[in-house]
Amino acid sequence: MKVSELEGKIPQQLYDVIYSNMSELRPAQAKSIKAGLLEGASLLVCTPTASGKTLIAELAALSAILNGKGKAVYIVPLKALASEKYNDFKKRYGSLIKTALSIGDIDSSDSYLANYDLIVCTAEKLDSLLRHHSPWLGSVKVLIVDEIHLLNDPKRGPTLELLITILKQVLKNMQLIALSATIGNAEELAEWLQAKLITDSWRPVKLHQGIYLNDRIEFKK
């Protein structure tokens, strides 16, 4: 799918940014759009690393924000990754939306976040914001969960599962975009999330398998 096919389907400011950086969408991105990404469909995207999952999330978040539908929250598992995503979003969309990074004090309601459009945080921080009944949470339209396979993590999994469960109940019209490169039971997870499953094997660099022995690698044909 050509990026030019998105003109008129997403806010013009967003289209201009994307079109200036690429001319063709990757397979998973095209599949997501055809599955209703731009119409508010919840998706579980399970594709290889560097296959374009982040742009799928950005299309959902920026479209909702720029169309005046509500805020977007982007959950990542680690503070370092949160900072990385925050810097990327600020660089790419700083002229279009207000992006905030919330990874600090877990005993604060962070009321200042009401003035921001896209909030990047960890699951633990969002859990704290929920417990503090931050009023701006009611205006969240898009929830993005990066590394959704961490639901299976003994430490982070329970918090993430609780967050998703509560937000799906409280925000009836919320669009959920879940991302992962490795899920063993993708169909089952998609059913639990009430999301459409998007899978694809395309990757920017071909993956070769081989066996290393005695300073030699024999690749599988």
Image (cartoon, rainbow, N blue to C red):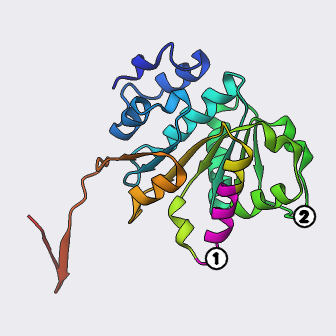
- x and y percentages locating residue 9 in the rendered image: 51, 17
- Residue 151 seen in the figure: yes
Compared across the picture, whether 213 is left or right of 2 comes to: left
- x and y percentages locating residue 91 in the rendered image: 64, 37
Q: Residue at x 49, y 38 (%)?
A: 56
Magenta stretch in the rendered image: 154-165
| First along the sequence among labels 2 and 1 | 2
Residue ranking furthest to the left: 221
Rendered-image quadrant of the N terminus:
top left
Q: Residue at x 36, y 36 (%)?
A: 26
Which dot marks residue 66?
Answer: none
Query: Of the residues shown, which amino acid type is indicated by label 1?
Result: Lys
Residue where numbered disc 1 is placed: 155
Q: Secondary structure at mark 2?
A: loop
Alpha-carbon neighbours of circle 2 within 10 Å: few (<14), some, or many (≥20)? few
Compared across the picture, whether 63 is left or right of 50 comes to: right
Residue where numbered disc 2 is placed: 107
In this rendering, is residue 218 above or below 114? below
Query: Of residues 193 and 22, which is closer to you in this image?
Result: 193
Q: Residue at x 40, y 63 (%)?
A: 185
- x and y percentages locating residue 218 in the rendered image: 12, 73
In this rendering, is residue 30 above or below 127? above
Q: Secondary structure at mark 1?
A: loop
- x and y percentages locating residue 209 in the rendered image: 20, 67
Q: CA distance from mark 2 to mark 1?
A: 19 Å
Asked if the stretch drawn in magenta spans residue 162, the answer is yes
Magenta span: predominant SS is helix
Q: Quadrant of residue 208?
A: bottom left
Query: Of residues 67 and 79, which is closer to you in this image?
Result: 67
Q: Residue at x 84, y 43 (%)?
A: 113
Q: Quadrant of residue 221?
A: bottom left
Alpha-carbon neighbours of circle 1 within 10 Å: few (<14), some, or many (≥20)? few
